[in-house]
Image (tube, rainbow, N blue to C red):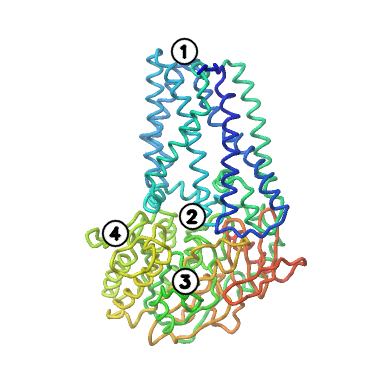
């Protein structure tokens, strides 16, 4: 076959990569449209968005994605090796490499393998540059190999991202967001999770074969041996055009591509470009509330918040005439336990027999809603008792050392406070967060490794955490001080693996529902063993989910995606019963403190659910949308200063949301007062 000589590699590769991006973007959208998670009941305009805007979004991002290729294109030239600049550049590169390798690696803060990956890549690049600087004869062949590797990496990345978007959609019902950012940062857990959940060997081989075929199709009749050493004129023209293209593409993606409205969020999500969504999430984990959300006068917001929370100057003085009951407290937040897994809330599979029985002996909150769709949101809610923050949870941020917290109230009442987690507490910044709130941290590294029954990439099984907890509680009891321990479970998380022989399940044993059944068994086993302990009669157990298994739905904040089970269990102290008030995760600990007759000056936004003055409302959020459910109205505050309100009608176990054409001012003002005061308090 006759080969056509390519004189400029970048201009050869750029249009071919853009075509690949468009084809993959179309295939991904087709897969998402016909995915079981997707609710397809939109109109012609939604279809136009998906096709036309989808193409524009993919073209725009593919232009930006070519920037790394241009950087490679720049460094392929032999000019950088010419004396004396080659040696000067080499000296600077050596100093930078040595500094990062031996003195200051900015990736250390994330833990896991990230520092090793960065250091390995940097060391490899330094070795490559050294060899090419000292051995000029190998540069041409090296350049040709580098060109093929870059094209192969681009193909692998594009295909991998396309597949990952479909997998991510299956799990969360959205394009890439802050969760995907966290997954990139916490590489060890995530890669391990993927390996344990999917047949990676055939998948990787398949992607490599397809990627290799794509590169072969691009270059099968092309001679690219001399295409990677551009003249300065070609390089300068390319730089100007690429810069202009990136500016236009970035402007479109940042300002325009989400501003074509539609009632169905699935259609809006599908027309977007997942990679750009990822970059936006990466760069905006903290949203400036004043810049992005609709504001009211600060004094009015504070006054209304104080009235709604029963505060005066930001403080609610809680006083009891009787002495406090300093009972031990065990708070269990269960990973991804939606209310609809339980029999009481409509499940007919019988996968939670222990919790079903426990609810009959507990004070149960039937209409309690999670504040978010991630573990850190639940931890934030029960620890700080605040409405969810815009952007990332406060658990992931710094500067919360002086925040009023559950731990502070308990320590002021003589408790030892601890956080117990079967994984690595650096994940999601949990260790740093709870340490700053005064908790002692007990994680997998503190467990007796010989006693661990089972672990996967996320950490130990639930029963291992409960075994560790029982041992710690015995020690706390021996010290004679009341104890509070917050236990975060793991097992109800993909890859849904757990010790054998604990449960029987008809169906796939590595499924969500099987994991729920094991999680339920572990709780039942824990309570049974705890009941034999001398400290049991003086202990209160608070059990709730951190969030639901999925928050995907037709709307951005589907209420059924935030409804979680919650109960307080303490035989002889807590009278069993069912509370049907609409309430939030942030209300649970203030309610318990009132039952224990704690007197304190509260700064919590959460209130005692059992009080006759309790105002029924719930808070729920994604990373950008802040929801406030009060009465029969759901108010959603969104960037850029957008407000959406829906009339909520409950139909059995589900909720129907109908957009309101006229603003319900009372609900809007209350939502703004809560969220504005809480977010500005952090800032």
Q: Calculate the distance from the C-alpha at mark 4 to the C-alpha at mark 2.
A: 23 Å
The residue wearing badge 4 is 446
> Element at badge 3?
helix
User: Farthest residue in the right direction?
Assistant: 662
Indicate which disc residue 84 carries: 1
Classify residue 287 as left or right of residue 403.
right
Q: Which residue is painted at 31% across and 74% down in the image? A: 525
Return the residue nearer the eye: 42 or 320.
42
- Classify the position of the C terminus by image quarter: bottom right
Q: Which residue is mark 3?
A: 341
Q: Is residue 52 shown above or below 420?
A: above
Q: Residue furthest left?
A: 450
Q: Which mark is residue 118?
A: none
The answer to whether residue 533 is left or right of residue 251 is: left
Residue under pointer 2: 396
Vertical relation: 359 (above or below) 149: below
Residue 183 at what x, y percent from top left? 46, 50
């Amino acid at each position: 076959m006759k080969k056509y000589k390519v004189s400029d590699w970048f201009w050869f590769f750029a249009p071919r990569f853009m075509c690949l991006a468009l084809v993959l973007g179309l295939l991904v959208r087709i897969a998402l449209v016909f995915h079981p998670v997707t609710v397809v009941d939109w109109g012609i305009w939604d279809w136009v968005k998906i096709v036309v805007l989808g193409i524009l979004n993919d073209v725009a991002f593919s232009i930006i994605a070519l920037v790394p290729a241009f950087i490679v294109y720049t460094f392929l030239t032999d000019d950088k090796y010419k004396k004396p600049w080659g040696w000067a550049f080499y000296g600077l590169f050596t100093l930078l490499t040595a500094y990062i390798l031996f003195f200051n690696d900015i990736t250390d803060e994330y833990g896991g393998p990230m520092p090793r990956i960065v250091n390995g890549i940097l060391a490899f690049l330094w070795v490559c540059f050294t060899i090419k600087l000292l051995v000029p004869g190998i540069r041409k062949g090296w350049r040709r190999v580098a060109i093929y590797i870059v094209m192969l990496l681009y193909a692998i990345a594009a295909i991998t991202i396309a597949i990952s978007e479909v997998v991510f959609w299956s799990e969360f019902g959205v394009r890439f967001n802050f969760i995907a950012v966290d997954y990139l940062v916490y590489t060890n857990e995530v890669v391990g999770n993927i390996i344990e959940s999917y047949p990676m060997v055939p998948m990787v081989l398949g992607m490599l074969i397809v990627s290799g075929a794509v590169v072969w199709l691009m270059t099968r009749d092309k001679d690219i041996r001399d295409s990677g050493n551009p003249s300065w004129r070609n390089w300068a023209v390319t730089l100007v055009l690429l810069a202009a293209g990136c500016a236009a593409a970035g402007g479109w993606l940042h300002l325009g591509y989400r501003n074509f409205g539609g009632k169905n969020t699935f259609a809006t999500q599908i027309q977007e470009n997942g990679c750009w969504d990822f970059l936006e999430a990466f760069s905006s984990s903290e949203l400036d509330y004043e810049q992005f959300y609709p504001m009211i006068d600060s004094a009015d917001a504070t006054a209304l918040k104080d009235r709604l929370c029963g505060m005066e100057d930001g403080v609610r003085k809680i006083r009891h005439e009787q002495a406090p009951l300093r009972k031990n407290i065990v708070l269990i937040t269960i990973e991804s336990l939606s209310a609809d897994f339980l029999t009481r809330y409509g499940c007919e599979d019988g996968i939670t027999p222990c919790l079903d029985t426990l609810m009959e002996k507990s004070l149960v909150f039937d209409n309690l809603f999670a504040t978010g769709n991630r573990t850190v949101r639940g931890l934030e809610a029960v620890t700080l008792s605040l409405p969810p923050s815009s952007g990332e949870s406060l658990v992931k941020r710094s500067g919360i050392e002086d925040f009023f917290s559950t731990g502070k109230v308990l320590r002021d009442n003589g408790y030892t406070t601890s956080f117990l987690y079967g994984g690595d507490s650096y994940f999601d910044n949990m260790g740093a967060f709870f340490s700053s709130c005064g908790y002692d941290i007990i994680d997998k590294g503190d467990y007796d490794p010989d006693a661990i029954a089972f672990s996967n990439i996320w950490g130990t099984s639930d029963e291992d955490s409960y075994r560790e907890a029982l041992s710690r509680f015995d020690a706390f009891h021996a010290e004679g001080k009341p104890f509070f321990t917050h236990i975060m479970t793991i097992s109800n998380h993909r890859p849904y693996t757990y010790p054998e022989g604990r449960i029987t399940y008809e169906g796939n044993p590595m499924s969500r529902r099987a994991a729920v059944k094991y999680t339920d068994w572990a709780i039942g086993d824990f309570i049974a063993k705890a009941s034999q302990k001398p400290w049991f009669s003086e202990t209160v157990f608070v059990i709730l989910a951190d969030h639901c298994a999925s928050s995907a739905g037709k709307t951005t904040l589907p209420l059924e995606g935030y409804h979680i089970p919650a109960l307080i269990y303490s035989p002889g102290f807590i009278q069993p019963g069912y509370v049907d008030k609409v309430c939030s995760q942030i209300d649970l600990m203030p309610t318990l403190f009132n039952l224990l007759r704690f007197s304190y000056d509260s700064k919590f936004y959460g209130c005692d659910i059992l009080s006759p003055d309790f105002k029924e409302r719930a808070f729920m959020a994604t990373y950008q949308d802040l929801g406030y459910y009060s009465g029969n109205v759901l108010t959603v505050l969104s960037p850029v200063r957008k407000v959406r309100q829906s009339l909520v009608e409950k139909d059995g176990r589900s909720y129907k949301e109908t957009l309101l054409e006229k603003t319900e001012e009372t609900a809007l003002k209350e939502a703004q007062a809560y969220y504005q005061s809480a977010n500005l308090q952090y800032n």
